[in-house]
Amino acid sequence: MIAYLDASVVLRLVLGEPKPLAEWRRIDTAVASALTEVECLRALDRLMRLGAFTGEELAERRTAVYRLLEAVEVVDVGRPVLRRAAEPFPTPLGTLDAIHLSTALAWRDARAASLAMATHDKALATAARSVGLETIGV
Protein backbone atom coordinates (compact mmCIF):
# COMPACT_ATOMS: atom_id res chain seq x y z
CA MET A 1 0.00 0.00 0.00
CA ILE A 2 1.13 3.55 -0.76
CA ALA A 3 -0.06 6.06 1.82
CA TYR A 4 0.17 9.79 2.31
CA LEU A 5 0.83 10.52 6.00
CA ASP A 6 -0.43 13.66 7.66
CA ALA A 7 0.96 14.97 10.94
CA SER A 8 -1.77 13.33 13.03
CA VAL A 9 -0.50 9.87 12.03
CA VAL A 10 3.15 10.71 12.70
CA LEU A 11 2.44 12.39 16.03
CA ARG A 12 0.26 9.55 17.31
CA LEU A 13 3.13 7.16 16.64
CA VAL A 14 5.85 9.39 18.08
CA LEU A 15 3.85 10.26 21.18
CA GLY A 16 2.76 6.68 21.79
CA GLU A 17 -0.88 7.71 21.84
CA PRO A 18 -3.72 5.19 21.80
CA LYS A 19 -5.06 3.81 18.51
CA PRO A 20 -2.11 4.40 16.17
CA LEU A 21 -2.68 3.73 12.49
CA ALA A 22 -3.88 0.11 12.29
CA GLU A 23 -2.67 -0.20 8.69
CA TRP A 24 0.87 0.96 9.52
CA ARG A 25 2.50 -2.41 8.76
CA ARG A 26 0.71 -2.63 5.39
CA ILE A 27 2.34 0.58 4.11
CA ASP A 28 5.08 -0.20 1.61
CA THR A 29 5.66 3.39 0.51
CA ALA A 30 4.91 6.46 2.61
CA VAL A 31 4.61 9.99 1.27
CA ALA A 32 4.28 13.22 3.26
CA SER A 33 4.45 16.94 2.76
CA ALA A 34 7.38 18.94 4.11
CA LEU A 35 4.59 20.60 6.08
CA THR A 36 4.27 17.40 8.14
CA GLU A 37 7.72 17.89 9.64
CA VAL A 38 6.95 21.48 10.59
CA GLU A 39 3.59 20.56 12.12
CA CYS A 40 5.08 17.70 14.15
CA LEU A 41 8.00 19.71 15.48
CA ARG A 42 5.79 22.69 16.37
CA ALA A 43 3.33 20.40 18.17
CA LEU A 44 6.14 18.80 20.16
CA ASP A 45 7.58 22.18 21.14
CA ARG A 46 4.14 23.40 22.19
CA LEU A 47 3.55 20.27 24.31
CA MET A 48 6.91 20.66 26.03
CA ARG A 49 6.20 24.30 26.81
CA LEU A 50 2.84 23.28 28.28
CA GLY A 51 4.64 20.85 30.60
CA ALA A 52 3.70 17.59 28.88
CA PHE A 53 7.34 16.50 28.88
CA THR A 54 10.89 17.69 29.59
CA GLY A 55 13.45 19.19 27.25
CA GLU A 56 15.23 15.84 27.11
CA GLU A 57 11.99 14.08 26.16
CA LEU A 58 11.42 16.77 23.53
CA ALA A 59 14.81 15.97 22.00
CA GLU A 60 13.98 12.25 21.94
CA ARG A 61 10.63 12.84 20.27
CA ARG A 62 12.11 15.26 17.72
CA THR A 63 14.67 12.58 16.87
CA ALA A 64 11.83 10.07 16.45
CA VAL A 65 10.09 12.43 14.00
CA TYR A 66 13.29 12.85 11.97
CA ARG A 67 13.91 9.09 11.90
CA LEU A 68 10.37 8.29 10.85
CA LEU A 69 10.46 10.89 8.08
CA GLU A 70 13.79 9.54 6.77
CA ALA A 71 11.82 6.52 5.56
CA VAL A 72 9.18 8.71 3.89
CA GLU A 73 9.20 10.42 0.51
CA VAL A 74 8.90 14.05 1.59
CA VAL A 75 7.30 16.33 -0.99
CA ASP A 76 8.18 20.03 -0.97
CA VAL A 77 5.32 22.49 -0.96
CA GLY A 78 5.65 24.54 -4.14
CA ARG A 79 3.49 27.07 -5.95
CA PRO A 80 1.45 24.45 -7.86
CA VAL A 81 0.45 22.72 -4.61
CA LEU A 82 -0.38 26.06 -2.98
CA ARG A 83 -2.47 27.11 -6.00
CA ARG A 84 -4.38 23.84 -5.86
CA ALA A 85 -4.89 24.24 -2.09
CA ALA A 86 -6.40 27.68 -2.70
CA GLU A 87 -9.05 26.20 -5.00
CA PRO A 88 -12.43 25.12 -3.60
CA PHE A 89 -12.88 21.57 -2.33
CA PRO A 90 -16.20 19.74 -2.15
CA THR A 91 -16.13 19.82 1.68
CA PRO A 92 -14.97 22.42 4.24
CA LEU A 93 -11.23 22.25 4.81
CA GLY A 94 -8.71 24.38 6.70
CA THR A 95 -5.56 25.76 5.12
CA LEU A 96 -3.06 23.18 6.35
CA ASP A 97 -5.34 20.26 5.50
CA ALA A 98 -5.93 21.75 2.04
CA ILE A 99 -2.15 21.82 1.53
CA HIS A 100 -1.89 18.19 2.66
CA LEU A 101 -4.68 17.09 0.34
CA SER A 102 -3.29 19.08 -2.59
CA THR A 103 0.15 17.56 -2.02
CA ALA A 104 -1.32 14.05 -2.00
CA LEU A 105 -3.29 14.72 -5.18
CA ALA A 106 -0.26 16.20 -6.95
CA TRP A 107 1.85 13.17 -5.99
CA ARG A 108 -0.85 10.75 -7.15
CA ASP A 109 -1.39 12.59 -10.44
CA ALA A 110 2.35 12.80 -11.20
CA ARG A 111 2.83 9.08 -10.68
CA ALA A 112 -0.55 7.78 -11.80
CA ALA A 113 -0.47 5.56 -8.73
CA SER A 114 -3.08 4.56 -6.20
CA LEU A 115 -2.66 6.45 -2.93
CA ALA A 116 -4.45 6.23 0.41
CA MET A 117 -4.77 9.23 2.72
CA ALA A 118 -3.62 8.20 6.21
CA THR A 119 -5.06 10.59 8.77
CA HIS A 120 -6.79 10.66 12.12
CA ASP A 121 -8.48 13.95 11.15
CA LYS A 122 -12.13 13.48 10.17
CA ALA A 123 -12.39 16.66 8.08
CA LEU A 124 -9.30 15.76 6.04
CA ALA A 125 -10.54 12.20 5.59
CA THR A 126 -13.94 13.43 4.39
CA ALA A 127 -12.33 15.84 1.93
CA ALA A 128 -9.97 13.11 0.68
CA ARG A 129 -12.87 10.73 0.07
CA SER A 130 -14.78 13.51 -1.70
CA VAL A 131 -12.00 13.74 -4.32
CA GLY A 132 -11.64 9.98 -4.76
CA LEU A 133 -8.88 9.00 -2.35
CA GLU A 134 -9.13 5.94 -0.14
CA THR A 135 -8.74 6.90 3.52
CA ILE A 136 -7.27 5.01 6.44
CA GLY A 137 -6.94 5.96 10.09
CA VAL A 138 -10.40 7.36 10.82
Image: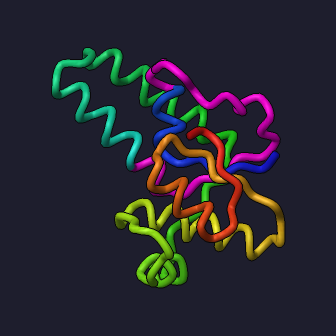
Instruction: Say whether residue 36 is magenta.
Output: yes
Say which residue appears at 50% left-offset and 75% top-offset: 90
Above or below: residue 41 compared with residue 104: above
- The image quarter containing residue 80 is bottom right
Q: Is residue 55 left or right of residue 6?
A: left
Say which residue appears at 39% left-offset and 49% top-offset: 38
Q: Nearer the viewer, residue 135 or 111?
A: 135
Q: Quadrant of the C terminus?
A: top right
Q: Position of residue 7 (x, y in %)?
A: 47, 44
Instruction: Say whether residue 33 is magenta.
Output: yes
Q: Position of residue 77 (x, y in %)?
A: 50, 69
Q: Position of residue 51 (x, y in %)?
A: 18, 19
Say which residue appears at 59% left-offset and 53% top-offset: 32
Q: Quadrant of the N terminus?
A: top right
Say which residue appears at 72% left-offset and 33% top-offset: 23
The stretch of residues the image draws in magenta is 14-38
Above or below: residue 117 compared with residue 136: below
Above or below: residue 111 compared with residue 66: below
Q: Is residue 73 left or right of residue 66?
A: right
